[in-house]
Image (cartoon, rainbow, N blue to C red):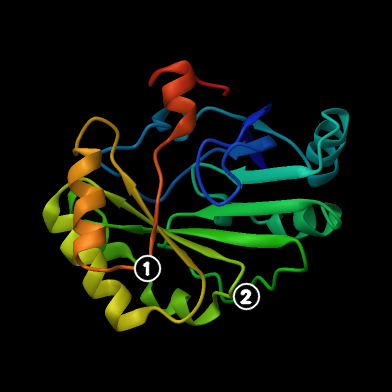
Amino acid sequence: MQVNEIFLSIQGESLSSGFPTIFVRFTGCNLRCSYCDTTYAYEDGVQMSPVEIFEQVKRLHYKRVCITGGEPLLQVDLKELLALLEGYIVTIETNGAVSIEDILLTEGHSWVMDMKAPSSGCSENMMLDNFKYLRNEDEIKFVIGSRADYDWAKEIIKSNYLKGTITFSPVYRKINYEDMVNWILSDRLDVRFQIQLHKLIWGVDKTGV
């Protein structure tokens, strides 16, 4: 498995926002989103076995782990790593462009699945069949950069949503937070609004947090 970084921080987004979390960031992504804030993970990384990764996770003591990237579903040994993390609270962040059908998650493990809206430049890559495999404990995240993105997200939800928590997250410094909240309330959407907490704490450019 090609690992870009492993570090301890607090979770800056998703349902686990604010909790101390161990991040395992894998190298490589099959998308190139316009607003990507982890371009450094496209190529840089070191080879580690699932056991080596798990040993490093254990040394950081906490039982909450975020598996991210890049795109972690491109790693062939992901199932083995998840088996080692049995008993941990694990979120797997996936970009919506890789099938999740063949990975059956155990108790305490959940998906955070992105749906890339049009301003990302990658909306046509979304695998909408993934909605069929999500559970109540999973999360669907829409990163919103414009009113057009917001309207697109509403249509995707209307046509495909079955289970899970829906989160709307504004692209950092690209959209007015108040406007977006007003749209949600005006449309009476039952979605979760979030901002990226880590960027408020450390700024937009700091890595390893």
Label 2 sits on a secondary structure element that is loop
Where residue 115 sits, quadrant-wise, is bottom left
Rendered position, 39 above or below 137: above
Percent position of residue 206, x then y: 47, 17
Residue pictured at 25% horizontal, 40% vertical: 177
Please name whichever residue, 208 or 180, is drawn nearer the observer in this view of the structure. Answer: 180
Please name whichever residue, 28 or 180, is drawn nearer the observer in this view of the structure. Answer: 180
Q: Which residue in the rendered view is the most extreme toward the left?
A: 148
Residue pictured at 69% horizontal, 73% vertical: 104
- Residue 12: assigned label: none
Asked whether, in this view, residue 151 is left or right of residue 43, the answer is left
Percent position of residue 59, x then y: 87, 28
Q: Nearer the viewer, mark 2 or mark 1?
A: 1
Q: Quadrant of the C terminus?
A: top right
Percent position of residue 114, x then y: 41, 57
Callout 1, which amino acid? Asp
**What residue did someone put label 2 on?**
102
Q: Which mark is first along the chain, 1 or 2? A: 2
Where residue 190 sits, quadrant-wise, is bottom left
**What residue did someone put label 1 on?**
190
Please name whichever residue, 53 or 207, is drawn nearer the observer in this view of the structure. Answer: 207
